[in-house]
């Protein structure tokens, strides 16, 4: 169903704006009034990565008057395969700075507000409250649910996108929609985030770069429709894309009463996991070569990651298998070569996040384990700089 425009029209267009936005002005459904709404709009994009990059570029090109960018990361070379707002010269720069420069060069009409912070419970409401609409281009479940919960509490509409490998989903969530539409939020689609470690991130499983462009552009389209009251937004619908089959499908979404039950009871803190530095692991592996140590190194990354870089001598068991049967993995590790001394298990992944989950699961199964601090990235930095990183 159509919804009223989110934003009132701004002042009449200048002569140069009529020329710049002329292709919008030719659209009967959008027109001059719709363009003035865009110029008066305030949109927050959370994440200047794979989805945020194309969304920001198209929103700026469309003439959205104020664009807020939330991101606390720096540009890395591995980002450039899909994060098209950044260039090779931007590697090492803050993403908000790189994005702001690119947007300013694209359209001087746009005011870019840089939020170089990690969105958290303590700052989310204050940031979101300054905008008419939010786009979520993040890649982790904690932030996705924080953004959705914050928007729901404030009544701010949210354009949401999710992407992994060759698949994507896009929808619009709004807890207090105008025009008589039914309210829906992320928790009506997925009531709670999946257990840690059960769903890989793009950094673990990969993503087709061009797919980010498709999805980010669709998110920008939904934003334009909501801001101007044009067309039928994806509120109450989820667009699902299978890029390998070149097939879009649609899933209806209705309020299901399955949202998170609030409780005053604080969740229990997970048990701390002991860590080992890369240099300390290198010393232990060297001692193992001399027969003076029985350390077992467990690599819990995906098989495709091991085609890029490996630490020699590691036993490979993907994280999902460790979490599904830690006791069984413990038996595999018991069969690893042992010289009779007490063996320690050291778990490693790319950066240390997955290895912490695996080490905690192994410890619960009776196998004390350490996590390699910083993962294979730390190994490449401190032990073997010739190793490829990703």
Image (spheres, rainbow, N blue to C red):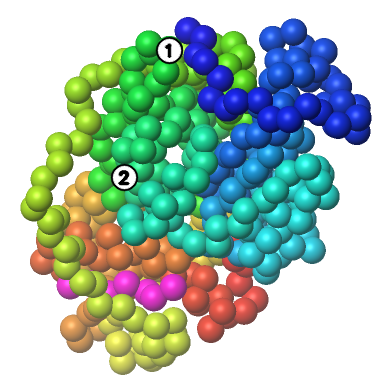
244 lies above or below 249: below
Label 1: which secondary element: loop
362 left or right of 53? left
* Residue 328 spot, x, y in % from top left: 18, 54
| Label 1 sits on residue | 179
Residue shown at the point (46%, 32%) measured from the top left: 158
313 left or right of 198? right
324 lies above or below 117: above
Which quarter of the picture shows residue 231?
A: top right
| Label 2 sits on residue | 198
* Residue 13 spot, x, y in % from top left: 81, 28
Which is closer to the viewer, label 1 or label 2? 1
Determine crowd level at label 1: few under 14, some 14-19, many 20+ residues with C-alpha closer than 10 A: few
Q: Please tell me which residue lies in front, 235 or 2.
A: 2
Give the magenta-colored segment's residue range. 368-374
Which quarter of the picture shows residue 26?
A: top right
* Residue 273 spot, x, y in % from top left: 24, 72
Mark closer to the chain start, 1 or 2: 1
């Amino acid at each position: 169903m159509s919804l009223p425009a989110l934003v009132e029209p701004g002042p009449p267009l200048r002569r140069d704006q009529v020329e710049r936005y002329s292709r919008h002005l030719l659209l009967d459904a959008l027109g001059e009034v719709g363009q003035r709404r865009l110029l008066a709009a305030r949109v927050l994009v959370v994440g200047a990565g794979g989805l945020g990059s194309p969304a920001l570029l198209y929103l700026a090109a469309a003439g959205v008057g104020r664009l807020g960018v939330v991101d606390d990361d720096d540009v890395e070379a591995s980002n450039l395969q899909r994060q098209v707002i950044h260039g090779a010269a931007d590697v090492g720069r803050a993403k908000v700075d790189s994005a702001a420069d690119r947007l300013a060069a694209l359209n001087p009409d746009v005011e870019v507000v840089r939020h170089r912070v990690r969105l958290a419970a303590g700052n989310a409401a204050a940031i979101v409250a300054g905008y008419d609409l939010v786009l979520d281009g993040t890649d982790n479940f904690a932030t996705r649910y924080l953004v959705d919960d914050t928007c729901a509490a404030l009544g701010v509409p949210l354009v949401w996108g999710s992407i992994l490998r060759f698949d994507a989903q896009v929808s619009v969530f709004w807890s207090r929609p105008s025009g008589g539409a039914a309210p829906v939020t992320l928790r009506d689609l997925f009531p709670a985030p999946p257990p840690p470690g059960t769903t890989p991130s793009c950094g673990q499983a990969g993503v087709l770069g061009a797919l980010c462009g498709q999805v980010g552009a669709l998110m920008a389209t939904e934003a334009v429709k909501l801001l101007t009251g044009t067309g039928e937004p994806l509120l109450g619908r989820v667009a699902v894309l299978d890029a390998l089959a070149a097939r879009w499908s649609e899933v209806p979404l209705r309020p299901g009463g399955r949202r998170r039950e609030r409780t005053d009871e604080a969740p229990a803190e997970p048990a701390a996991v002991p860590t080992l530095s890369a240099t300390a692991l290198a010393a232990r592996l060297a001692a193992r070569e001399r027969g003076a140590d029985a350390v077992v190194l467990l690599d819990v990354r995906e098989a495709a990651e091991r085609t890029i870089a490996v630490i020699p001598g590691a036993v490979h068991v993907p994280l999902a298998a460790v979490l599904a049967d830690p006791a069984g993995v413990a038996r595999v590790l018991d069969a690893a070569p042992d010289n009779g001394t007490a063996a320690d298990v050291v778990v490693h992944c790319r950066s240390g996040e997955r290895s912490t989950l695996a080490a905690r699961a192994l410890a619960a199964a009776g196998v004390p384990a350490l996590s390699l601090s910083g993962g294979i990235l730390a190994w490449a930095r401190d032990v073997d700089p010739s190793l490829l990183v990703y």
